[in-house]
Every structure is written in structure tokens, then in C-alpha cells.
Image: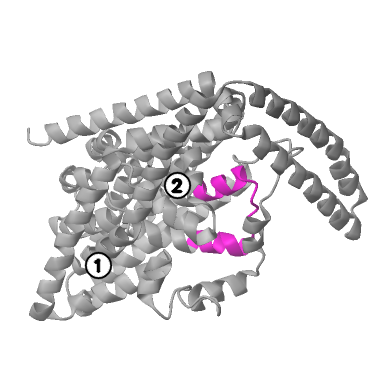
Amino acid sequence: MEKQPARSGHTLGLVSILAGVLLAIGVGVIWGRTMWLASGGPDRNIEELCKTVQQKEQFARQAEAAGNQKEADRLRGQIPLVQKEIERSEALRRQAEQAELGFARNAFEVIRFCGDVFLRMLLMIVVPLVVTSMICGITSLGDMSRMGKVGLWTLAYYLITGAAAVVLGIALVEIIRPGVGMDDTFAYVDESLLGRQESSVVGTVLEVIRGRPDAPASGLIPENILAAASDTNILAVILFSLLFGGALTTLGEKGKPAVNFFRAANEAIMKVVRLVLFFAPVGIFGLIATRIVLSGGGQALAVEGERLGWFVLTVTLGLAVHTVVLCLLLWVLGRRNPLRYFCTMGRALLTALSTSSSSATLPVTIECAEEAGVSQRAAGFVLPLGATINMDGTALYEATAAIFIAQSAGVPLSGAALVVVFLTATLAAIGAPGIPEAGLVTLLIVLSAVGLPAAGIGTILAIDWFLDRQRTAVNVFGDAVGAAVIDRWLKK
């Protein structure tokens, strides 16, 4: 009975988010074109189209130099179509200058303000959330020097399955390519983003570890950790937090005040996170409506809807395949019937789907695991740890979402950039809090690491609530499979 208010509150929050999404779509469809004209949409369109003409000519020359005359002719054949679109945009600009669009312009600024403030609030809490979550997660394991084989097996298992989920997500999104449009006639690639991807895999990995010579705060091992936090170098913050938390566990009684401090700080940060997410309906409305308006209004919604449909299919397929992989691990390593175990965990999975929170589901997960025959020792140690650091579904989603956003923006990611996505998504998932919509916060970490604009999350906010439930269920099932596997190893 005590859990019911929280569940009702979450249901109300979900309804509010859905209302914000629907309102944003309605405003975008009905009024988006007018606000696009009022906010200087034709001018932005003309500027980008002119750059597109120059870029296509540049790419055509590069194709000729590479001996690909067919591609060069194709690109040059698109230039007249782009020039006609420039003429049409100039006519729209003259139309906007003659119309009275002051109210529409002010309305758009207010809508954009709501989205910008929400996005800034999310960015504001990323670093403190990662620091406190990581330190609390490590200190909850007890003395690292005495953790023994059980702890090491559990950590290794969770890291391997998390990394496998990320690889699966990257593979599927690169094969299906949900964010890539079929027609590239009017496509323009932002060269400031494109330039960040031009590097070898080895060079990028070394740069990720060592940092750039001209940026002391960059890299996995920066010269100044405070400067790294200020620059939102999350990989460095994650590594330092893990080392610091591990060191605290070895101090015994001396380290308890610091451990208690970070636990209290983590609880406070989680309250701030929930406060920020309380404003999610308004912020999501602002971000989605702004995205629709800047895309040209309702006319662009069909294209966005098709891309989002393919994105949902990609993520859902990835989560389903990973669930099958977990079942195979359960059968091979845990020596259990996957179907029977899955059915026994049904109540926990339904709770995860309804609450969208692995932490809230934890008591039910432990109870179901013990009903399935997992020892109390394994369930009591592995499952709470998994609810903290094992987020297979979240890791898969973050990698897939980051690459989808890059594809939608026309930014090709090299193999080196994909390595960065792999590392960041795997590590960021460890610090993901087990609360609803927390994936929005950790997704910003991955976008920042690859150099993609944070505003790109506006592309996927309309369907995040739906995918959030799916990935939470996979997170919980991954925890349960881990408990069964570790339990068998303990009995050997």
C-alpha cells in the first residue's frame, strides 16, 4: 500500500509528458509554418542552401579527383534543384516581410525558451550526478581489497554484457540507418562537426586516454580534474570517481564520514533530478515544438515521423536480440531453463514496464529471483549491485540514439568516433540512476563525447517515454540473469 502513491505520481507524470508531446505536435502542425516564417526561417534556409551548393561542388571535385565521375555528375545534377529551392525561399522571405507576424515571433521565442531552460537544467546536473552515483555505487560494494571472487565475477559479468549491448546497438543502427534520408538533394553536412570525426581509430583511442595537447582538461587522464568537470569531460569524471570511490572503501572507519557525505549528496542530487524531471512536460513541449518549427512546420513532421518509426524499430529489435542473448547466457552459464526463468521473473518485468525504474522494481526483482531458486546470498548481493551499475538496455539505447542523432544531422561518424561512442555509452550507463527518464541525462554524456549538439535530443523526446519502459525491463532481466549465473558459480 505504501508504494501506490509513488506509482500514481509516476502515472500522472507520464500522462503529463504525453500531453506535452501531443501539444507540441499540435502546435507544430497548426502554427509551425507561421512561426517558422516569423522567426527568420527563410533566411536560415537560404543560408544553408547556399552552403549546400558550395559543398556539393566541393564534394563533386573530390569525387572527380578520386576517379568517380558518376558521383561527381550526380552531385552537380542536384545543384539546379537546390538553386530553385533558394528562389522559393526568397519568395517566402518577401511574403514574411509583408505579413504581420509579431505575435507568432514572440510565441516562438517563449516556446524556445522553455526548451532551452529545460535542456540547461539537464546539463547542469550531469557532473554532480555522475560523481555521486559512481562513488556511491563503488562504496556500496564494501572494501574493494576484500571483495573477493564474487564481486570481481559480478563486475566482470556486468561490464561484458553491457559492452555487448552497446556493440549490438551500434551494429543495428549502422545497418538499418534509421536517421538517414533516402534523398540527399538538400542535405548539408556541418563541417565543424564533420571535422571532429576525421581521425584514425588508434589515434582517437590514444587521444581519448591522453587528451589533446592544446586542451589540458581533455582526455581520460586530464591535468586538472576540476577543469575537466567544468568542460563536461565526463569520461575523466567517471574514471576519477571510480578511483576515488574505490580508495574510500579501503579506509575503513576513517572513510565512513566521506562515504556518508557522498551518500547524502547523492540523495540530494536525486531530489534535484526529480525536480528537474518534474518540469519535463513543459521542457519536452518546448524542445519538440522548437524542433518542428525550425524544420519548417508540419510539412517536415512526416519525414521526422518516419525516421522516429525506424528508430523505435531499431531500438526495440536491439533490446529483443539482447534479451535472447541473455537467455542464452542463462542457459549456458546458469544451467537454467530460460523460458521458465523468464516467466518466473514476469512480475518484476511488469513492474519495470509500469514504473520505468529499476530501483523501484528491486524488491520485486529480489523476491522473484528467490522464487526462481536463486540463493538469498546471490540475490542479496548481485541484484542491488545490478540495479546500480548494470544498465544493458540503457547502454544500448544511448549508443543507438547518439548515432541516430548524428545520422539525422547529416554527420557521418567514423570508426574512431564509434569507438568513442562505445566507451562513453558503456561507462555512462554505469552512472545512470535507476529512475524514470534518467536516460535523457546520460544521453547528453554520449553526445558531448562525440561532439554532437545537446539540442539533438529534441529529435527523440517524443518517443523516449515508450523506449524508457522497454530498456528498463531489459535492465531488470539482465540483473536477474546475472544473479542466476553468479549463483551457479558460487555453488561450484
Work out how far the residue at label 2 is from the one at label 1, CA to CA, in angstroms.
24 Å
**Would you identify the image quadrant in which residue 73 lies?**
top right
Prevailing SS of the magenta stretch = helix
Q: Which x, y percent locates residue 211?
A: 51, 76
**Would you identify the image quadrant in which residue 94 lies?**
top right
Q: Is residue 243 visible?
A: yes
Range of magenta residues: 400-422
Residue drawn 57% across the image and 28% down it: 38
Q: Which x, y percent locates residue 364?
A: 17, 42
In the image, is residue 419 part of the stretch drawn in magenta?
Answer: yes
Residue drawn 12% across the image and 67% down it: 260
- Foreground label between 2 and 1: 1
Which residue does the numbered mark 2 point to in the structure image? 397
Other residues around mark 1 within 10 Å, as few (<14) / some (14–19) / many (≥20): many
Q: Is residue 392 visible?
A: no
Residue drawn 19% across the image and 32% down it: 9
In the image, is residue 90 part of the stretch drawn in magenta?
Answer: no
Question: Residue flagged by tag 2: what amino acid is it?
Answer: Tyr
Decide: is 121 above or below 415. above
Q: Which x, y percent locates residue 297?
A: 57, 26
Decide: is 124 above or below 52. below
Could you tell which of marks 2 and 1 lies nearer the N-terminus?
Answer: 1
Which residue does the numbered mark 1 point to in the structure image? 135
The answer to whether residue 373 is left or right of residue 54 is left
